[in-house]
Image (cartoon, rainbow, N blue to C red):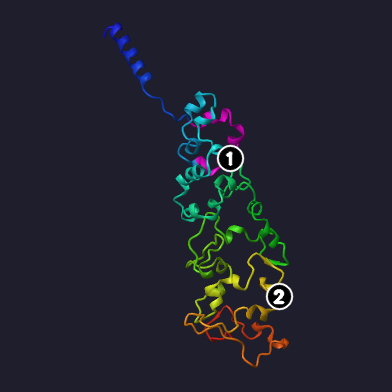
Amino acid sequence: MSPVIRLSGLLLLACLLEAQPKDPYIGSQACRACHVAQTQSFFRNAHTKAERGCESCHGPGRAHVSAGGKKDLIVAFSALSSRKALDNCLACHGKDWSRNNIRHSAHTQADVVCSNCHSVHQAATPKHLLAKPQKDLCYSCHPNVQSQFSMPFKHRVNEGTVQCADCHNPHGAPAPTWRMGQRPRLQQHAQANEQSCVQCHADKRGPFLFEHAALRVDGCGSCHAPHGSANPRLLNRPVVFTLCLECHNGAPGFGREGQGIPTQSASHNMADPRYQNCTTCHVKIHGSNADARFLR
């Protein structure tokens, strides 16, 4: 082959290669030159396992780099609308069962998106990449709940024994099976679509031969304040019989068979201190397999 023909072939190959479109992805190494703070600890992040690294979330970066860092040529989450930011995260995380209700959750309806709670680059907690410790993150929007955890009787969230996510699913929860159809606050369902309380209080789960209707219909919150209370056992009222009389007032037509709510017998004088603590005798108040009146 003559040198002229060989040279012509090389020039033609070079022209063809130049004419081909360049790969729009440039690789995560190029990001480190400008985004030092974001990349210096990113190797500890679970997102490093993504196929394209930074570009898995932020999109192709070649045009962004070639234009000297022009912001509108890359997916910048700070500039995205709430819906767009959510769509980007759900492209990968939408496959998880615990997160697939987020579009219908109270958080999304209030324009709270993933980046409000999670920090991908500089997380305060290695687990779940939270922007702050979990309780501080929740308290920043729910100060009324924070005050409840300062009550004399409470679940020990401030002490770190219990976390908000043990009872609540911030990404949304399925429709509830209690509280007369009123949706609980992102309640984390346990086992057979039951209240999250039975995850710890398994002895109250049942099934029982004789059920307490208040537990099955209104749930634990009909008697207990779940976050904190001034009363022992997190009760809604300081005296037990006043709590029981809220329901046991003879109202007709209630219950599975419409038999109404029974009242105390004539022998029970509510002015007598002996009868003011109902659970002294009705000890199996959450349900019983032996007695319909929840006696021992």
Name the main secondary structure of what is drawn in magenta. Answer: helix
The mark that comes first in sequence, 2 or 1, is 1
In this view of the protein, can residue 296 be seen by the observer?
Answer: no
- Residue drawn at (48%, 52%) of the image: 103
Q: CA distance from mark 2 to mark 1?
A: 48 Å
User: Is residue 33 rendered to the left or right of residue 95?
Assistant: right
The amino acid type, in three-letter code, at marker 1 is His
Magenta range is: 27-48
**Disc on res. 238:** 2
- Residue drawn at (53%, 27%) of the image: 70
User: Is residue 155 rendered to the left or right of residue 68?
Assistant: right
- Residue drawn at (59%, 36%) of the image: 38
Q: Give the image location of residue 40, x and y in percent.
A: 60, 35
Estimate how packed mark 1 is, as few (under 14), some (14 to 19) or many (20 or more) residues with alpha carbons within 10 Å: some
Outermost residue on the front side: it is 252
Q: Give the image location of residue 161, x and y in percent.
A: 65, 61
Estimate how packed mark 2 is, as few (under 14), some (14 to 19) or many (20 or more) residues with alpha carbons within 10 Å: some
Discs 2/1, front: 2
Using the image, determine if residue 91 lies above or below residue 37.
below
User: Is residue 236 rendered to the left or right of residue 111?
Assistant: right
Q: Which residue is mark 1?
A: 121
- Residue drawn at (60%, 86%) of the image: 263
- Judging depth in this view, the residue of 277 and 270 nearest the camera is 270
User: Is residue 155 rendered to the left or right of residue 31?
Assistant: right
Q: Give the image location of residue 226, x and y in percent.
A: 63, 66
Magenta span has 30? yes
The amino acid type, in three-letter code, at marker 2 is Pro
